[in-house]
Image (cartoon, rainbow, N blue to C red):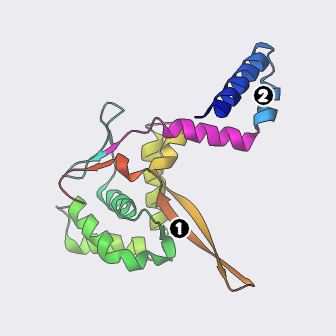
Amino acid sequence: MNDEEARLVEEIRTRVQMLQRMGRNDLLLRAIGVPALEELRIEAARGNLSPLHITSDYRFFLTLYNNIEVELPPLHKAVYLLFLHHPEGIEFKKLVDYRGELLHWYKETSRWMSLAKIEEGVDRIVDPLDNAINEKCSRIKKAFSDLMDEYRASYYIISSHTKRHLAGSAKVWYERLKVITLPRELVIFDNFS
């Protein structure tokens, strides 16, 4: 931070404290604006993110929260691992392209299940006419949301990210990717990748 930035930070801090002493949080909110406030809340949450430790037997632990376990069924873990390994994101409609990889993760997370049952579960996930992927993502979201506030949870869940593409001058198309935004340096894998 340079001198000008430091002066600006101090001026803002002083003005915020003045408004708060006057009991005018309404004016403070108007000055900051709701979109900026949301960005600040998300940035504050980012500073308190826990590493996600994934053990060799595919148990998920949040190390900063007393190693609390994020409990998920095997198929949900397989979906989560698939998205963790694709930080660029995946479109739900293209999940069939990831069938082999999802099958691998499901076999790993459910070692005692029959291959027919595993394949049936994966086929439902990659079927664009089945709602199974949305159900799994909702359950994953709930598992993390039950353990932390919504801002921190937003980094751990599978969420939407839309990429806008221009094809020529008159055509615009969107890629509706699903991603896990948790910085990958916070993901700790035991003996696999």
Residue name at image x 36 percent, y 49 percent: 185
The main secondary structure of the magenta stretch is: helix
Give the residue type that dot 1 points to: Leu
Disc 1 to disc 2, how far (Cα)?
A: 36 Å
The residue where tag 1 is placed is: 177
Q: Secondary structure at mark 2?
A: helix
Q: Is residue 49 magenta?
A: yes
The image shows residue 8 at horizontal and vertical percentages of 70, 30
Residue name at image x 33 percent, y 57 percent: 77
Classify residue 168 as left or right of residue 117: right
Quadrant of the image occupied by residue 42: top right
Residue name at image x 43 percent, y 74 percent: 95
Looking at the image, which residue sits at the far top?
Answer: 21
Q: Quadrant of the N terminus?
A: top right
Q: Quadrant of the C terminus?
A: bottom left
Reading the chain from its start, which is encountered first: label 1 or label 2?
2
The image shows residue 163 at horizontal and vertical percentages of 60, 68
The image shows residue 178 at horizontal and vertical percentages of 50, 64
**Is 5 located above or below residue 76 in the figure?**
above
**Is 104 located above or below residue 170 in the figure?**
above
Q: Secondary structure at mark 1?
A: strand
Residue name at image x 52 percent, y 37 percent: 45
**Is 94 located above or below residue 162 in the figure?**
below
The image shows residue 134 at horizontal and vertical percentages of 49, 63
Classify residue 66 as left or right of residue 146: left
**Mark 1 or 2, closer to the camera:** 2
Which residues make up the magenta segment?
A: 33-52
